[in-house]
Image: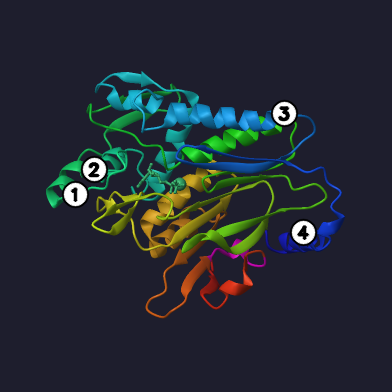
Amino acid sequence: MGRSLLIAVTGVCVCLAFAGCDRDTPPTEFSFEIMGTVASGKIHHDGDGSPVRMVEAVFDSINFQLSSWRDDSEVGRLNAAPAGTAVALSKWLNDCLIVSEALHKTSGGAFDPTAEPLMRLWGFYRRQGHLPSLAELDSVRTLMGGYTHDPDSRTLTKQRANVRFDLGGVAKGYAVDLAIADLSNAGIRSAMIDLGGNLFCLGAPPERDMWRVGVRDPLDKSLIFATMALTNQAVATSGAYERFVIIDGKRYGHIMNPATGRPAEGLLSVTVITSSATLADGLTTTLYVLGPDKAVDLLRTHYPNVDAILVLPGEGDEKARVLATPGLEGNLEIQENYTSRYLLSFLKF
Ligand code: ADP
Ligand code: MG
């Protein structure tokens, strides 16, 4: 990325400096609630608002099909299916499982599409936190795994009736990839779509080379602490601040560490930049579970071409640390008012 990106970024900055001479047709902007979060974006196109309806339709369908929060979704029905019977999967669920299983393998189980019983035990589905006992944690971890999936025939067989799936770690990214594919097929060349922190930058705004993307401050999600310039890339951010339950006044985030049975801790947020929104979504969850050291190892070993930004809390009076992959050097810029609070360094791969 390095040098060519730097030139392109400069191009964007020049464009921004001349913002007053913007000759573009304004994009259609949208924002609506779905999947317990907000979908928003900008689409540059000629004609009426139909591309927005296209995006809405995709997100609706994914929500309907892949939610583990509803019994009547495909995942809900799979969760209720008996053991020993091959269940036919839709292409969407099959695709999400393929990405999930690859992450499960590379991460040594940190990403686990069968983490549903953990989410349930901690009270996420009823939105009412529950602090489990050690006995509960031990027994729930025996419920994970235990299925065979044949991606070619698109079938899945549970080994026990109580194997239950939660695709929440990849479903939003997958929905974004589908929506972008639909927009591209409809001839749209410039759009930015964000589904709850899962973003895709298609092309660039008219007469610019890149989209400028902000990374949220994990300590105050209404602010951005850094920006970068991107084109035809997905960007996903995960942090415990997105969704959590409160038990005895303490916050517990919705990303589970299968090794401990507890919500993962250690990072403030993780951002991943790569060409697939599904992978970006799944990897943010995975890296968050692994924590800083193992996250860097995973990136180095299995995903050397994926860019990432890890935000670590500072200890005591220390600044929060921002670790970024080498591919972001020359692109990622910490906002001026954050340089005194966030210490940026680039990893060496
Ligand atoms: P968000 O974008 O909403 O922050 P993430 O992409 O970070 O979501 O994923 C969190 C979601 O992933 C949880 O709500 C749950 O559905 C699922 N999940 C939680 N822990 C795991 C895990 N260890 N492996 C796979 N999926 C998980
Ligand atoms: Mg994710």
Task: Determine whether label 2 and label 3 are within 8 Å by CB.
Answer: no
Which is more N-terminal, label 3 or label 4? 4
Q: Is residue 200 above or below residue 210?
A: above
Which mark is drawn over residue 186?
A: 3
Looking at numbered disc 2 in the image, what kind of residue is underneath it?
Leu
What span is in magenta?
324-330
Q: Is residue 184 above or below residue 29?
A: above
Q: Nearer the viewer, mark 1 or mark 3?
A: 1
Where in the image, quadrant-wise, is ligand 1 located?
Answer: top left
Q: Which residue is mark 2?
A: 121
Q: How many marks?
A: 4
Q: Secondary structure at mark 4?
A: helix
Q: CA distance from mark 1 to mark 2?
A: 7 Å
Task: Determine whether label 1 and label 2 are within 8 Å by CB.
Answer: yes
Q: CA distance from mark 4 to mark 3?
A: 26 Å
- Which of these two is toward me, 303 or 160? 160
Q: In the rendered structure, does residue 325 fall within the stretch colored magenta?
A: yes
Q: Secondary structure at mark 2?
A: helix
